[in-house]
């Protein structure tokens, strides 16, 4: 059996940076070639970054993607890497986009993969299954492919597929079995959500069984707006054996030697030639054709001992989420070229966790924490904020707000909740002023539970350009704090979050003795309701049957339904759950439907 040394490049491209992304390909290709790789694969839409969203509709961008692809093929050859076959995702088109009056059925923008070899683009594949659920809108952008590309490399028939092709039964993987391939390369832009790594391996095993072939699954890593890509690339044999698995949330070149079967019939190809030179067409089921391209015959096995990629075991849930939040924030700040971040430090659990995430992501010298006490701020809150600053080493400042609040009250007749909101808005003004003056990105600190029920002040504590906790339930915020402190202690480091911030009852401290529990159920009661209603769309009757108090339900559901206008104006933040506000959950603001009792 031929042995191929596979190289899966788990890398971090940036949307729109065609030159920078091509440089990543060239740099990693040098490393892969030096390691003796026979085939190198990069993630989905590597050249353009992913997702490009409405950039698809700009024909100038599509043309630039195609030009960058051909230039990259030539540059790889000029680098002395022309003998290394490289699979790269990119944006292609064989017709105008659907929004054009000149659009043609079956033609348009394509989510594509190309094989680069000997200085040229020698094969292309267009994604067949286009996801149109959750954060994905690919039916809006792309036209599905109807051809499976099979390339003979090193005496092995290799099929090219893209991301969602793996998540659906039938289609390219079923046709890959009919075509007798030995290896299916699947390039991905698969966003992270909690426990998704537990789903991927069984899924890849199912597709390996369906194709009767080894699967090389490569996923990108990094943050792109609200999405975080966690890597978790892997190689799975036809019998379901996990051969190699990369770590999550870091760039990694996974190298592994794989013994693969020769094509049936000793490598003879019996199809009739059609189309470009060296290509052969076959008609298969599922309305898919097979296009075969012959590049290289069997070659000697790699010299020396076998290269083993190793298997990285998944980490605990809290560690996984923390890494996702750190990576997502780091990339949002750096890819958008902010020099630093600023946030309000209240002494509470949410701002403490956001500050710790920011320090882990950027370093303490790029994080500014501002304590903004009012007459209602407790002494323990002030001291907890100062303690966190001391533990993390961030730039700590104190800006009392009471004189500013008093100036408003001296000129306007305000009372009750309006005065509470005024305090939050004065704090927002201070943070935005520091942002304007010093260039910081303002981080807002509200969690998903608060966002769900509208427990925030518009243009006050909700002010900011990015929210690391936007998709993190309150009960998970506490778990993350405890995990981060325990992780620090296990390494002999100072835990970043004061224990008093974790243990005290949560409060906005906008009026005397105020607690969250004055207006909200306990978070241990609230969060399970919200998870079911928001994440799984369970209605009132189903929630009652699940054992929730009907009176509590009616109050909570009303708060969720009437807060949509606030959520629509909230800052972006990383998706870590099955259904995040914004990209995943899209409801009308003007909406009279209610889950009545």
Image (cartoon, helix red, strand yellow):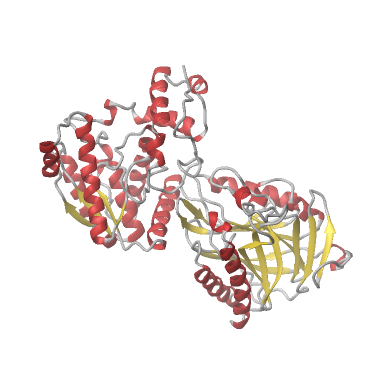
Asked if residue 279 shows in the view, the reply is: yes
Residue 69 is drawn in which quadrant? Answer: bottom right
**Residue 360 falls left or right of residue 126:** left
Exactly how many numbered labels are in the figure? 0
Q: Quadrant of the N terminus?
A: bottom right
Q: State the image coordinates of residue 128 (x, y, percent, origin top left).
A: 70, 53
Residue 451 is drawn in which quadrant? Answer: top left
At horizontal 26% and vertical 37% (from top left) the residue drawn is 503
Q: State the image coordinates of residue 43 (x, y, percent, origin top left).
A: 58, 61
Q: State the image coordinates of residue 511 (x, y, percent, origin top left).
A: 18, 32
* Vertical arrangement, residue 590 with respect to residue 549, above or below: below
What residue occupies the far front of the structure in this picture?
101
At horizontal 60% and vertical 67% (from top left) the residue drawn is 63
**Residue 530 falls left or right of residue 313:** left
**Residue 543 falls left or right of residue 114:** left
Q: State the image coordinates of residue 358 (x, y, percent, origin top left).
A: 33, 54
Q: Of 395 and 464, which appears nearest the observer?
A: 464
* Vertical arrangement, residue 120 with respect to residue 17, above or below: below
Asked if residue 52 shows in the view, the reply is: no
Q: Of 345 and 201, which appears nearest the observer?
A: 345
């Amino acid at each position: 059996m031929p042995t191929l040394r596979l190289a899966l490049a788990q890398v971090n491209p940036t949307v729109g940076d065609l030159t920078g992304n091509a440089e990543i390909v060239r740099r990693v290709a040098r490393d892969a070639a030096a390691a003796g790789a026979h085939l190198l694969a990069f993630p989905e839409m590597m050249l353009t970054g992913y997702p490009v969203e409405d950039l698809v509709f700009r024909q100038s961008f599509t043309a630039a993607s195609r030009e960058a692809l051909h230039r990259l093929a030539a540059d790889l050859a000029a680098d002395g890497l022309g003998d290394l076959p490289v699979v790269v995702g990119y944006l292609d088109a064989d017709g105008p986009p659907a929004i054009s009056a000149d659009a043609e059925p079956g033609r348009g923008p394509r989510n594509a993969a190309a094989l680069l070899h000997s200085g040229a683009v020698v094969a292309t594949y267009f994604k067949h299954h286009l996801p149109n659920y959750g954060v994905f809108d690919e039916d809006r952008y792309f036209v599905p492919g109807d051809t499976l590309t099979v390339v003979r490399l090193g005496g092995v028939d290799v099929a090219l597929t893209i991301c969602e092709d793996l998540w659906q039964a039938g289609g390219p993987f079923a046709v890959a079995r009919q075509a007798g391939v030995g290896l299916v390369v699947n390039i991905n832009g698969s966003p992270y959500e909690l426990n998704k790594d537990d789903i991927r391996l069984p899924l890849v095993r199912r597709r390996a069984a369906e194709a009767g072939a080894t699967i090389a699954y490569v996923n990108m890593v990094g943050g792109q707006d609200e999405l975080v890509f966690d890597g978790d690339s892997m190689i799975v044999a036809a019998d379901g054996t996990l051969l190699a698995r990369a770590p999550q949330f870091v760039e990694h070149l996974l190298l592994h030697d794989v013994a693969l079967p020769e094509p049936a019939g000793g490598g003879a190809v019996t199809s009739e030639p059609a189309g470009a030179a060296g290509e052969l067409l076959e008609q298969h089921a599922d309305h898919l054709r097979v296009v075969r391209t012959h590049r290289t015959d069997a070659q000697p096995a790699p010299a020396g001992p076998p290269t083993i990629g190793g298997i990285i075991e998944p980490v605990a849930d809290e560690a996984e989420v923390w890494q996702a939040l750190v990576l997502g924030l780091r990339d949002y700040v750096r890819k958008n070229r902010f020099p630093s971040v600023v946030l309000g430090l209240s002494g509470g659990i949410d701002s403490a966790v956001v500050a710790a995430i920011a320090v882990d992501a950027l370093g303490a010298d790029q994080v500014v924490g501002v304590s903004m006490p009012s007459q209602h701020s407790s002494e323990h809150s002030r001291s907890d904020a100062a303690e966190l600053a001391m533990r993390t080493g961030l730039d700590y400042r104190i800006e009392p707000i009471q004189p500013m609040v008093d100036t408003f009250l001296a000129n306007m007749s305000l009372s009750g909740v309006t005065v509470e909101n005024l305090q939050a808005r004065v704090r927002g003004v201070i943070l935005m002023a520091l942002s304007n003056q010093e260039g910081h990105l303002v981080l807002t600190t509200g969690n998903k539970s608060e966002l769900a029920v509208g427990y925030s002040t518009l243009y006050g504590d909700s002010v900011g350009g990015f929210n690391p906790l936007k998709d993190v339930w309150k009960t998970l915020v506490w778990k993350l704090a405890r995990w981060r402190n325990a992780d620090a202690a296990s390494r002999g480091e100072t835990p970043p979050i004061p224990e008093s911030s974790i243990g005290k009852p949560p409060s906005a401290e906008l009026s005397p003795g105020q607690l969250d529990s004055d207006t909200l159920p306990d978070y241990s009661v609230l969060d399970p309701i919200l998870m079911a209603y928001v994440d799984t769309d369970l209605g009132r009757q189903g929630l009652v049957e699940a054992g929730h108090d009907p009176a509590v339900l009616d109050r909570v559901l009303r708060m969720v339904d009437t807060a949509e206008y606030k959520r629509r104006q909230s800052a972006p933040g990383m998706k870590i759950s099955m259904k995040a506000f914004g990209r995943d959950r899209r409801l009308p603001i003007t909406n009279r439907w209610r889950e009545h009792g």
